Amino acid sequence: MDTSLRDRFTALWQQHFPGAELPLALEFRTDPGTAEKVPPPSGHRCIICQIGRARNGTPLAFDARSITCGGGLVFTGYSGTRPPGFRFFLSHGKAGVVEGERYKQTPEIVDAWEKAYVPISSQGKEMVFTRWDQLTEKDNPEVVIFFARPEVLSGLFTLANFDQSDPNGVICPMGAGCSSIIHWPRLEQQKDDPKVVLGMFDPSARPCVPVDVLTMAFPMKRFVKGIGYMEESFLITKTWDVVKKKIERSNAAQKKA
């Protein structure tokens, strides 16, 4: 990628979202470069918990062996099949077979929900997470992922809708936490006019993120456009100056917590 784009956004981010966490860039590629390979975890492990180190500045590379969650394997594109009894697992369970998460009322609703799923294969590639400021000219991100609290989300949401007449410039499809930052925004990236994805509402993934934090995932082609109009948007108004002060107070409170 063009590193001048990296530096431009970093400067604008610090100016308009002072102290807020920089986003992660997601890319699937055959050569993970210098990213640290994530070893197979012992037992079940949520991907959202696994990428915390990338948010803190350690680029991470995953393959199918790095993931032990069945849903994670599907939503990252390393598997095309659900585990046996999934329709019961996501609904009310089945006695003696599987305990249900009760995220859907009935197995039939799960079946219908599954029919709308569009798979993306990642076979032969590694999934690399790199914090935005650590990107190099060799990187080619597909998705840019923000972990943010409400004031920052407000800015990202409004920026995502700035050049849109469609009121649904941001979508919030139901799915696992990893689907909201990987599968759905990757799917949008394949479209001519991609949507931004709000997520991390999955109760199973919530233990892996701080209190009050959700995600906003931009398909890269949408993100590049957003950078282009930051300096003509609401971000230069007195209204946003007030919100910026709240962001600074929020950051200070987080550090004390």
Image (tube, helix red, strand yellow):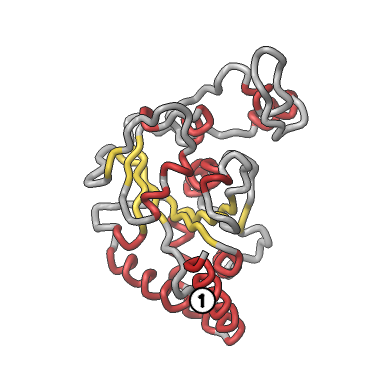
Most extreme residue toward the left, as rendered?
34
**Residue 190 on image: x %, y %:** 48, 46
Most extreme residue toward the top, as rendered?
96
Q: Residue at x 61, y 59 (%)?
A: 169
- Whether residue 132 appears in this view of the structure is yes
Crowd around label 1: few <14 · some 14–19 · many ≥20 (10 Å): some
Q: Nearer the viewer, residue 174 or 66?
A: 66
Number of numbered discs visible in the structure rendering: 1
Q: Residue at x 59, y 39 (%)?
A: 204
Q: Residue at x 52, y 50 (%)?
A: 209
On screen, 8 above or below 202? below
What amino acid type should be assigned to the residue bearing mark 1? Glu
Most extreme residue toward the bottom, as rendered?
238
Q: Which residue is mark 1?
A: 248
On screen, 157 above or below 112? below
Q: Nearer the viewer, residue 78 or 224?
A: 78
| Apparent side of residue 162 relative to residue 231 in the rendered image (left or right) | right
Q: Residue at x 46, y 39 (%)?
A: 47
Quarter of the picture containing the N terminus is: bottom left
**Residue 173 on image: x %, y %:** 63, 45
Most extreme residue toward the right, as rendered?
105
**Residue 50 on image: x %, y %:** 42, 42
Judged from the image, the secondary structure of the residue bearing numbered disc 1 is helix
Q: Nearer the viewer, residue 140 or 67?
A: 67
| Apparent side of residue 127 relative to residue 148 in the rendered image (left or right) | left
On screen, 182 above or below 2? above
- Whether residue 193 appears in this view of the structure is no
**Residue 174 on image: x %, y %:** 65, 42
